[in-house]
Amino acid sequence: MSLAVRPLARQAVEDRPEQKGRSVRVFSADISATGEPWLWALGGALALGIILIAGFLALIFWNGVTTFWPKPIEVVTLQGGTLVAGEPFRAGVYRPDAGIIAKLSSEQQAFVEENGGFAQRTLYRTANFDIYGDDFRWVSDYEVAKVDYPRDFYLFERQEWGNFVGRIKGVIIDNQPQEYVADVMARAQREARDRFNEIRSIERGDIGRINHRLEQERLSIRRAELRYGPAAPETLAATERAVARIAELNAEFTVHQKRIADIRGIDQRNRVVLEEVGGRTKETELSQIVRYYPSNAVTTPDKIGIYFSRWGEFLSSEPREANTQGGVLPAIFGTVAMTLIMVVIVAPFGVITALYLREYAKQGRLVSMVRISVNNLAGVPSIVYGVFGLGFFCYTLGITIDQLFYPERLPNPTFGTGGILWASLTLALLTVPVVIVASEEALAAVPRSMREGSLACGASKWQTIRYVVLPKALPGIMTGMILAMARGAGEVAPLMLVGVVKLAPALPIDGFAPFVHLERSFMHLGFHIFDVGFQSRNSEAGKPMVFVTTLLLLALIVLMNSSAIYVRNRLKRKYATGHF
Amino acid sequence: MSTVAEAANASPPVDLSAQFQPTLYHTVESGEGVALDLRDFNLWYGSAQALFSVDMAIQKGMVTALIGPSGCGKSTLLRSLNRMNDLIDELRISGEVIVGGENIYRSGVDVIALRKRMGMVFQKPNPFAMSIFDNVVYPLRVDGVTNRAVLEETCERALRSSALWNEAKDRLKESALGLSGGQQQRLCIARAIASDPEVLLMDEPCSALDPIATAKIEELITELKGHYTIVIVTHNMQQAARVSENTAFMYLGRLIEYGDTKEIFVNPKLGQTRDYVTGRFG
């Protein structure tokens, strides 16, 4: 084709006398020969991939970032005179059933008719679950008479029962009903919250400690029984001592209980009277109110303050309201702790295996088979690892450990059930193929000349590996570790079997000896997403939290990975300029 | 391009393999002053024989050059001297290599100790990804030497011997990978002589270097001889002629002619040697 085109083009030049004398060469080739269409296809595929990823990230980012922004409260007057108050949550067009249309008034029917049988509807987050028995309500446009934005409507975030939308009718301070004054109420609410936190810290701190010691005393009796027999004099003596201490502890416990009861008494005298849009009232203790603000009257700086205070609560406190509100601190902690334990376990395992396979094992059929098996392990569905973890780690290993080391706690399992250690081990098993493959490749990439150089210096094989091969391969090994970490931190399915729970406010690390409790079950952000989005009574309310939690999990993985990459680059530089 | 082809046509290359007769001519004899003595040394990679009955006495304190066309077994021979070939699976040998009165292929020989007695410099500079200092003192470190003063003194001595001290003395803590190719090769020489070996084995040490770096290395070899027995594999006939006292011509796994360098280049006894050193083939 190119041969056919060239003379024609020359001809065309020669036909135009003004272009004569200038040499014009025409380069052309068949389009299939240049491969251009393939290039477009490749570029298109890449672009599609990037768009998908960017779109996915943008969706999560946008939904996650906007969730905590305060929204206005609309008060909708329906045509029948009913009032609906709430934050508009989402809207959509739908086609009402014939049955529903038949029940409408003639004007409403005409309205729907006009829109071609379609209607617009808005989902309002009406809150007040304790009064309405529901959190949300759909309102269709044909029902609406008018929409107001009253400035005296408040949104209350409560410790229990979720949000409340309504007016403040009055404040009861020290059992004295008073008119609502913003400052007085704000101060009273702050004080009430302080009291609430005080109760919590007494429960967590002092009472937690007493409970822990009571448990220890009970266990000491049981231990003595197991050791000396139930009727032995040692047992009786131990029991006597423990009983005395238990009595002391109980006395202490009563003191704390009394303190809590006193604080509760004050709490009960400070209340607020709320009125929902329909006029029904509700009295709530001030201490139950986490946060409140007049949605339609707050200024932008206030909104920013509320926004960040919500983020602060999200990142630093425990969940409330079946995980749909409050924070995710235990889940953050659980995710990070589990991932780190996993890395600590998987790193030596994977690297040692790779070292042996690559450096020491005789490369033959057996090693090939091991290598193929390792690669195939990476393709086993993760839930299978979960089943294995449950069966082997929890039930076999765990129960053995319980029988050997914690007989006094039986039949309550200690290690014989899901826990953060077993979850980390299961994930380590899941990610070890990634580490082995990456480490092997990194080791294989160390040039032969370097090994020979070291051996020629009179270094042993081990010294060569230790001082020359491993440092050189370390960045590659770290890359494998980073991949494993990303995979492990995002994995959920196996964890559901080996230790992740819906709610575990007790962190795996606390102030009671031995401080690190690897047997404890834990919360995980990935599971939290599943739980909030699909397992809670109020999945609609949980939806925004799904996005926020996803955003947080992504951010956490990015953070962990970038710190690992930072460490890797530091190592690269360190070994490039090198110490021994 | 065409001139080369014409030249080839004018004098057709000699096909030695067809008429090959292992006529050997050795003037260097075993006896006093021999550092390495190969006796009837054969080597097989699997079923392919790479070295055929090599008898060679390498003299102490002299530079011995190994020349010959690619694949003739020069490097294999060199690497047999410090048992670097042990890394290869399916390697078989027969015969003896006597070093200090002892056959290094005898069972029970400490290969690591042997390698410590023989420094080796490779075709491509292969400094480790460490600082210059750590590179030079690596042989001592693997020996367990931790005394800082000893290490520093050794480093300076080795770098001075390899004529790198002036260039490297201010950057001992910097990565060795930042040096130029020629400097890296001299660093490798410094590393090879740091543990004060008896023999220095050089496997085409200048093939990856430019002429100036090559000149420096050759100068260095000239300075080092006397202290060390040097065995150098080279493709560069001029280099062999310049630096060595004895030259060994190898062909197809056999040591063909071995003798005084001047004799080999000026007055070779065998036709094959003459063809090779005059550039008629190879």
Image (cartoon, helix red, strand yellow):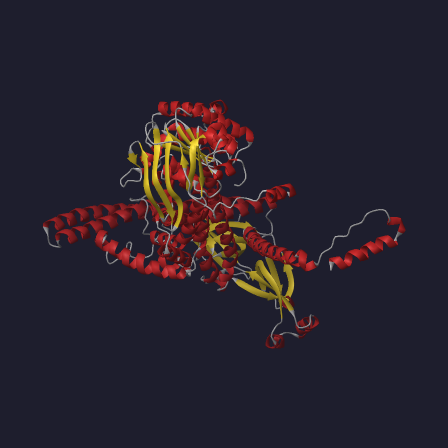
Q: Is residue A37 left or right of residue B59?
A: right
Report the residue at 55% width, 30% height from top: B211
Seen from the viewer's position, the closer of residues B112 and A40 is B112
Q: Quadrant of residue A7?
A: bottom right
Q: Is residue B170 visible?
A: yes
On the rendered structure, is A423 left or right of A168?
Answer: left
**Residue A156, percent from left and from top:** 51, 53
Q: Please identify the quarter of the rendering in which residue A475 is found.
A: top left
Estimate the x, y position of residue B222 in percent, counting from the top left. 46, 25
Quarter placement of the C terminus of chain A: top left
Residue A346: x and y in percent read 38, 49
Asked if residue A181 is positioned above or below residue B152 in the image, the reply reads below
Return the x and y of residue A160 as percentages of the image width and height.
44, 56
Q: Report the number of discs.
A: 0
- Say if A151 sits above or below B271 in the image: below
Q: Nearer the viewer, residue B224 or A444?
A: B224
Question: In front: A404, or B221?
Answer: B221
User: Foreground: B47 or A492?
Assistant: B47
Q: Is residue A380 above or below residue B15?
A: below
On the question of residue A468 being in view, the answer is no
Quarter holding the N terminus of chain A is bottom right
